[in-house]
Image (cartoon, rainbow, N blue to C red):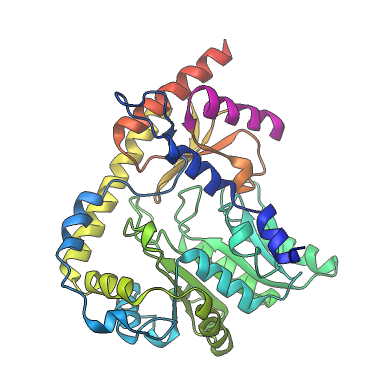
Amino acid sequence: MTSATARRLTAGAPAIAEAHFRAEADPYDPERNPDGYLNLGTAENRLVWDLLAPRLAACPPLTGDAARYGPLYGTPEFRRRVAAFLGPHVDPGDLVVVSGATAALDVVATALCDPGEVIVTPAPYYGAFDVDLAGRSGARLRPAAGGAFEIDPAAVACAITEARRDGLVVRAIAISSPHNPLGVVHPRQLLRELAQVAAELDVDVISDEIYANCVFGRTPFTPMAGLPGSPLPAHRVHTVWGFAKDFGLPGFKAGVLHTTDPAVRAAARELAYFAPLSTQTQSTLGELLGDAAWIAAFLAESADRLGRSYAAAAALLDAHAIEYVPAEAGFSIFARLSDAECPDEELRLWRELLERLRVSILPGRLFHCPRPGWFRVCHSVPAATVRTALTRVGAHLARAAR
């Protein structure tokens, strides 16, 4: 007999991960494997490896220090370089380094919540939050859906109030900023309004900012912890960041939690014992962060490529008269592929696309979208893959509409 936690984790494995591994096990190739999967379901930046490969190869040989035990929450030098990269509002002593943003989310939720306590998150939201924030901590996620595809502070306040009316303890609000799956960059005023809700209702904010440097639109990104004029005390904001998106290195599994709350930081350091990042990886990534000129050029080129990739994908959706939410950041477009009025219709279309068209995209229900028929379409892969996949989808939808 396994534990309740083990059973919960087994039952709640992220469908996002399942779809990824299925598609990657049998990838499309126009000549060698034309019946393989066209994967627009995985949020990876596959447009920048040509920039990363030579820079990683130029890293100096590892020293003996990289083979020895280091502090399990990150070496002092690595935390110093990460803090310098993240901005002047970040002190290295307030960083906890772990093996990926997923681990950082798990750590902060465990530090903040006892089993059964609530984290409210605006819907739609990143579907893996269900496991990342609640899988081991035992916290409950409660969606807060507004009337439009953006954070609605009033809806968040209502969700907190209703949860408390139900006798539940609410500990935090969780957001992704920039937003996943919408690709929206939250304006400062909206973040201030959300901070005001958190301050008035006495809850913390967990801000997943893993796409912070993947902005290609006009709205500037503002870190929640560095929000000018925030009504929420700094120690009540806990930020998660990592190298998976901004640097196109998801396989390195390098994540960071930034918190100025002494109690949360102390707990997070202890929890890092179970998810440390190797000293070798810290040495390699620290070397990258130490090259300021390369970092600036890389991030600028990455944002430019993402912008062009988004524009090309949006043009394809326009050509097929497919509605979508305009994006300014990230790797995906949230598109309406169906007039479905119930979740079952959305799932039926998802299976048709996956099984018959061999196109992997993710249905909105995995992101707790309150409206059926919406899908997350990732565009940060080679242009030919996006073009082939969306052409198939557009033709399929046109045939179905006849």
Say left or right for 89 vs 296.
right
Callout count: 0
Which of the 4 quarters of the picture holds residue 5?
bottom right
Is residue 15 depicted above or below 162 in this figure? above
Check residue 169 for magenta coloring: no
Q: Is residue 358 visible?
A: yes
Secondary structure predominantly adopted by residues drawn in magenta = helix
- On the image, the x and y values in percent for residue 196 come to 60, 72
Is residue 250 depicted above or below 79 in this figure? above
* Residue toward you, 363 or 156: 363
- On the image, the x and y values in percent for residue 307 come to 31, 45
- In this view, the residue farthest toward the right is 166
Say left or right for 7 vs 86.
right
- In this view, the residue farthest toward the top is 402
Q: Residue at x 50, y 31 (%)?
A: 323
Q: Which residues are magenta?
A: 343-359
- On the image, the x and y values in percent for residue 219 come to 38, 55
Q: Is residue 40 visible?
A: no
State the quadrant of the N terminus. Answer: bottom right
Q: Residue at x 34, y 79 (%)?
A: 83
Say left or right for 125 vs 227.
right
Q: Residue at x 30, y 30 (%)?
A: 384
Which of the 4 quarters of the picture holds residue 32?
top left
State the quadrant of the C terminus. Answer: top right
Q: Residue at x 73, y 61 (%)?
A: 159
Is residue 53 depicted above or below 277 in this figure? above
- On the image, the x and y values in percent for residue 328 come to 39, 49
- In this view, the residue farthest toward the front is 1
